Image: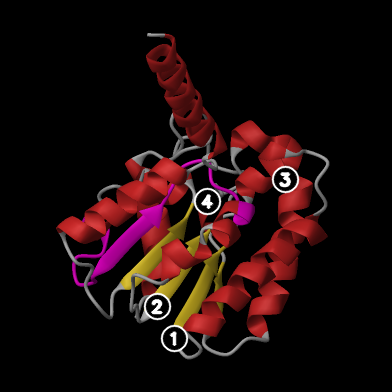
Amino acid sequence: MKKILSAFLLLCFIIAFSQEKKPMFWHDIQEFKKQDQQKPPPQNAILLIGSSSFTKWTDVADYFPTKTIINRGFGGSRLTDLNYFANDLLSPYQPKQIIIYCGENDFADNHQLKAQKVVKRYKSFYKKIRERFPNIEVDYISMKYSPSREVLWPQIKEANARIEAFMKKQPHSEFIDVTKAMEDANGRVRKDIFVEDMLHFKPEGYQIWTKVMTPYMK
């Protein structure tokens, strides 16, 4: 009886330990894999990779009815997470274009984080993309100025400028600046396009993004 109890406790410990060791967002990645198994992803699609602004855009296909889109945004993710899961986010697909929205959460996770550090993380992920897809279009959407994160705007502004300068030097790459389109007539960030948390969008916010993104869509 003692041996059975010991074996049971050991099994419980192993299970608990293995669960604790799973990295953040592991379950999100497994869900993507499950979706791909149930329905093989189309080739030559536009692949969206990034954080919650993509995750919550569940009806993105309705905004771009003539495009084939694979949405692989996972809420709360940082550029560190995109780098960590790069193989899982890239290897299952054969896209004609990749559009990235990520970086806000890096700053939110550490308010003291320097813009240069975030840009370095982005460059690392961009390099991983190019190693696998050297010739496809790769675009980066500028980090938005979320009203709830106004304290981070100076860092976000600097990081956006640095990433824009980097992307201008890369082939088949574009920096998609959504910041101006999200301002009112007085140059202030429109709060009416955000839900109550002042971080995520109402449909009106996504309509603005759609208008800005459309010329860049393959």
In the structure shown, which secondary structural element does the residue marked by tag 3 occupy?
helix
Image quarter for residue 160?
bottom right
Query: How far apart are the two marked residues, 4 and 2, measured between alpha carbons?
Result: 24 Å
Q: Amino acid at mark 2?
A: Gln
Of the image marks 2 and 3, the number of the one nearer the N terminus: 2
Residue drawn at x 25%, y 50% as measured from the top left: 59
Q: Which mark is residue 136?
A: 1
Disc 4 + disc 2, Cβ < 8 Å: no
Left or right relative to 181: residue 114: right
Q: Which residues are magenta?
A: 62-80
Q: Residue sitting at 67 percent across and 47 percent down?
A: 106
Q: Quadrant of residue 189?
A: top right
Q: Is residue 196 visible?
A: no
Q: Secondary structure at mark 2?
A: strand
Sequence order check: which comes first, mark 1 or mark 3?
1
Residue that numbered label 3 is attached to: 153
Name the residue tied to disc 2: 97
Q: Quadrant of the C terminus?
A: bottom left
Disc 4 target residue: 182
Residue type at mark 3 is: Trp
